[in-house]
Image (cartoon, grey):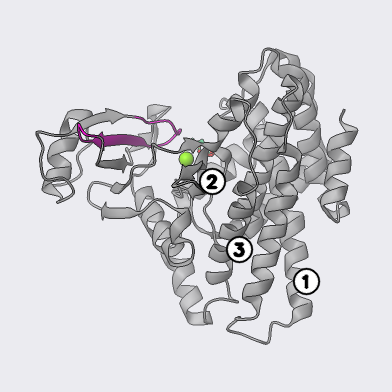
Amino acid sequence: MGYRILETDDIPGYLHERGHWEDVTDIHVREVSDGNVNRVFLASNAAGTRGLALKQALPWVRVAGPSWPLSPDRSDAEARAYAQLAKVAPDEIPAIHGYDAENHALVMEDLSDLEVLRTVLNEGAAYGPHTSPGIGRLVARLSFATSDFGLPSAERKALIAASVNPELCGITEDVVLSEPYLEHEHNHWHPGLDDLAASFRADARLRTEVADLRHTFMTSAQALLHGDLHTGSVMVGARAGAPVVRVFDPEFSFVGPIGFDLGLYWANTLVSEQRARALGTLIDHGDQLRLSWEAFETEFRRLWLTRVDTFFDDAHLDRFLHRVWSESLGYAGTEIVRRIIGYAHLTDLTTLPDPVPASRRALLLGRELIVGRAQLPDVDAVRAVVDSLG
Ligand code: SR1
Ligand code: MG
């Protein structure tokens, strides 16, 4: 039948045809699309005892419309990433009930009893003790399992080949890792940031460091990444009294530098900290980089004992983790910068009564993480930079 774009009214019949829903007289569907790229629908029954989510990739970027075409094949990358994540972190992702490659549609667990982490934070709540350790552990498990330490060499080569995601990597290479440092129609910013935006575009040192991170993004096939691990890709809450953390939306997944996943998460925690400082609601925001890094490192070192290739010795592990650390800082810096003077801004800042002071602090922090990453040996050094910004 071929690819058809599903509208709300099509969902009951579609779910029935695909064997996901029996009684089409007892189904209510609503569109809840929230991310920049795809469409999401939630289906539930009248009693509220049954729910499913359906995510479909459109042939364009959802928020831009047909003027920004994008192959819906990105849903294949998302389905592949979920399959890998299910092997190492099944309780930290939504349950996947089916993937329809022809219609670029994933049917999965309804997470609407949970909340998007960014929303929770914007409403003034804390991260809590489980969120960032959970993220750090998930990144460690996914990255170790899909690295040359976790997989035999030939299987790794096959994974790298099967995981290429050129269009979405191209978006990141553009909107995160080059456009904010150039004149580009995608860029926009608050007029109170005119001077910083201009100085960043004229900053040769900054540009060279971003070029270095961009080239690493393009060439460093360390492990399978989520690829877009910001606080809008994480849901949190509680079930049966126990904390729940779920990571979703891995359509930007590809085999790349591990620091890109950690760095995106760190950037978003650091920006949330600037929001909380501006509003006087600072709680545990400043602990999140440390908590996620410590959980990542602890889990990666634990898994190291199971590595498939022991030519990689313990000294190599230390060197490797140091590289991941400093690249994570660099990517955190690029994510902060692009979210303020590039494309796709963060509501953490845009919804502040006066976004300028917090945005200025964040931009200066982002620049320092990019250009100073090799001189920031540990979490305390990063905290010192954050604190120096006032
Ligand atoms: C055109 S897509 C813009 C951004 O939205 C996604 O969530 C990614 O972060 C991407 O960079
Ligand atoms: Mg997304």
Mark pair 2, 1: CA separation: 26 Å
325 sits to left or right of 87? right
Distance from mark 2 CB to nearest ligand 1 atom below 8 Å: yes
Res. 217 visible in picture: yes
In primary-sequence order, the first of circles 2 and 3 is 3
The answer to whether the residues at label 2 and label 3 have Cβ atoms under 8 Å apart is no
| Residue range highlighted in magenta | 32-47
For badge 3, the amino acid type reads Ala
Mark pair 3, 1: CA separation: 15 Å
Residue 282 in which image quadrant: top right
Which one is nearer the viewer's eye here, 242 or 101?
242
Residue ID for mark 3: 140
Q: Residue 370, how many percent across, how many down?
A: 78, 44
Residue ID for mark 1: 318
29 sits to left or right of 323? left
For badge 2, the amino acid type reads Asp
Provide the major secondary structure of the magenta segment: loop
Which one is nearer the viewer's eye here, 83 or 163?
83
Above or below — where is 169 with respect to 62? below
- The residue drawn where x is 66% and y is 60% is 296
Residue ID for mark 2: 228
Which one is nearer the viewer's eye here, 308 or 43?
43
| Label 1 SS | helix
Q: Residue 344, how many percent across, how many down?
A: 55, 30
Res. 202 visible in picture: no
For marks 2 and 3, give the one nearer the viewer.
Answer: 3
| Label 3 SS | helix
